[in-house]
């Protein structure tokens, strides 16, 4: 029995879904993605074994839903507003993806330390036929060291309830018959991604299966930091009082030919500072759209800079041969004291995970820190960048 990973957990489809989230979805109003809408009648459960991978239509994935806790109480996702939520869909008979992911989330909880109290870990069973509340409670306890339900919140529901949740998050599942009577005669293909919900209840990131716990922690910390940033749809007057300046540290960065640069060099111009690394798949995916956006905005006093986080200059140079960009690339080679690891300047700029993009207005004020990839040349993002005061 194999628990295959349906769309959107493949890298290509994950990027499409994650880029279209545009974290500013609430501030920008309704966004249109693709052409076909995901309607209420679209099938999300396929007992015949046929794929029903849902297409992303004119609705943005995510939203509130209602299921039951393992104690039989009603649960709404909005009950967790104020916390970052890591949402995962799986089932207890899953042979590989689910136990690996739950083991990783246990590591994430440990790495977050005290900050884990600001994070809720939620597991939704996609197998209502076999996963009773008692079975799921026992299963999750193996990964929570007996802390359940304080560690991971397990959720169950009827098939119609589950279908509504899957539709809300644009998730497809597929029941696959097999010859194993012990496993109930079927396995379930399902999304293997982690869905990251911001404290205000919006889906802001989709983390593909297989990334290390350190990456997940970086995303979570980035979402926490972003929740404290001012909204981008504030008026200029509000921004003048609510935005914050960059940390009072005059960082200096080098480029690949030894030139030296400072963020202060761009005062008087709007700056889009994208922090990335060669090993970061979402970073690589969003570079082409960054390049296209920089070309479109080149005459509008909006500048783009790619700040590499900790890679060796030779690695960056080799990477750029395959992924050329039209805007400056800086290197963050300063080491953290006592660790010897490069990337200390980016950490000083409140960067917690990758990719992260800092938006600075023409007065040098940091008006937003956007965590995760974006489709930078979309009309919505171009309008957002043009609105920088």
Image (tube, grey):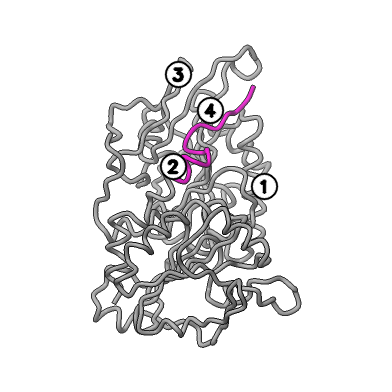
Residue beneath disc 2 = 73
Q: Main secondary structure of the magenta part?
A: loop
Expressed as whole percent of the image width and height from the top left, the position of residue 119 reads: 52, 58
Q: Which mark is residue 189?
A: 4
Mark 1 Cα within 10 Å, few/some/many (few <14, many 20+)?
A: few
Q: Quadrant of the N terminus?
A: top right
- Spatial CA distance of label 1 from label 2 is 20 Å
Residue beneath disc 1 = 146
- Spatial CA distance of label 2 from label 3 is 34 Å
Q: Is residue 14 above or below residue 275?
A: above
Q: Nearer the viewer, residue 281 or 220?
A: 281
Mark sitting earlier along the chain (2/3): 3
Q: Is residue 303 above or below residue 140?
A: below
For discs 4 and 2, the disc positioned in front in the rendered view: 4
Q: Quadrant of residue 90?
A: top right
- Spatial CA distance of label 1 from label 3 is 38 Å
**Quick check: marks 1 and 4 in contact, CB under 8 Å?**
no
For discs 1 and 4, the disc positioned in front in the rendered view: 4
Which secondary structure lies at badge 4? strand
């Amino acid at each position: 029995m194999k628990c295959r990973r349906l769309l959107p957990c493949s890298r290509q489809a994950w990027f499409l879904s994650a880029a279209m989230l545009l974290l500013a979805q609430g501030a920008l109003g309704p966004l249109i993605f693709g052409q076909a809408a995901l309607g209420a009648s679209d099938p999300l459960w396929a007992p015949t074994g046929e794929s029903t991978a849902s297409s992303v239509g004119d609705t943005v994935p995510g939203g509130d839903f209602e299921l039951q806790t393992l104690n039989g109480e009603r649960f709404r996702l909005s009950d967790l507003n104020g916390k970052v939520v890591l949402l995962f869909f799986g089932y207890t008979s899953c042979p590989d993806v689910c136990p690996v992911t739950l083991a990783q989330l246990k590591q994430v909880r440990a790495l977050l330390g005290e900050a884990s109290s600001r994070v809720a870990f939620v597991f939704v069973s996609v197998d209502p036929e076999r996963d009773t509340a008692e079975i799921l409670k026992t299963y999750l306890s193996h990964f929570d060291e007996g802390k359940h339900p304080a560690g991971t919140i397990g959720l169950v529901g009827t098939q119609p309830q589950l279908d509504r949740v899957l539709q809300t998050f644009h998730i497809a599942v597929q029941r696959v018959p097999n010859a194993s009577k012990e496993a109930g005669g079927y396995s379930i293909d399902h999304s293997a991604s982690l869905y990251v919900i911001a404290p205000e209840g919006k889906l802001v990131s989709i983390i593909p299966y297989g990334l290390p716990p350190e990456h997940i922690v970086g995303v979570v910390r980035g979402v926490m930091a972003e929740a404290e940033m001012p909204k981008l749809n504030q008026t200029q007057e509000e921004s003048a009082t609510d935005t914050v300046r960059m940390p009072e540290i005059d960082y200096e960065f080098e480029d690949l030919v030894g030139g030296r640069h400072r963020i202060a060099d761009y005062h008087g111009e709007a700056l889009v500072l994208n922090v990335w690394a060669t090993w970061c798949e979402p970073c690589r995916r969003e570079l082409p759209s960054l390049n296209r956006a920089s070309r479109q905005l080149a005459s509008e006093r909006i500048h783009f800079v790619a700040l590499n986080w900790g890679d060796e200059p030779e690695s960056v140079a080799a990477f750029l041969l395959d992924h050329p960009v039209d805007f400056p690339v800086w290197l963050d080679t300063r080491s953290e004291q006592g660790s010897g690891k490069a990337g200390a300047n980016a950490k000083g700029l409140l960067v917690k995970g990758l990719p992260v993009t800092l938006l600075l207005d023409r007065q040098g004020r940091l008006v937003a820190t956007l965590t995760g990839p974006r489709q930078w040349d979309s009309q919505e993002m171009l309008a957002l960048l043009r609105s920088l005061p």
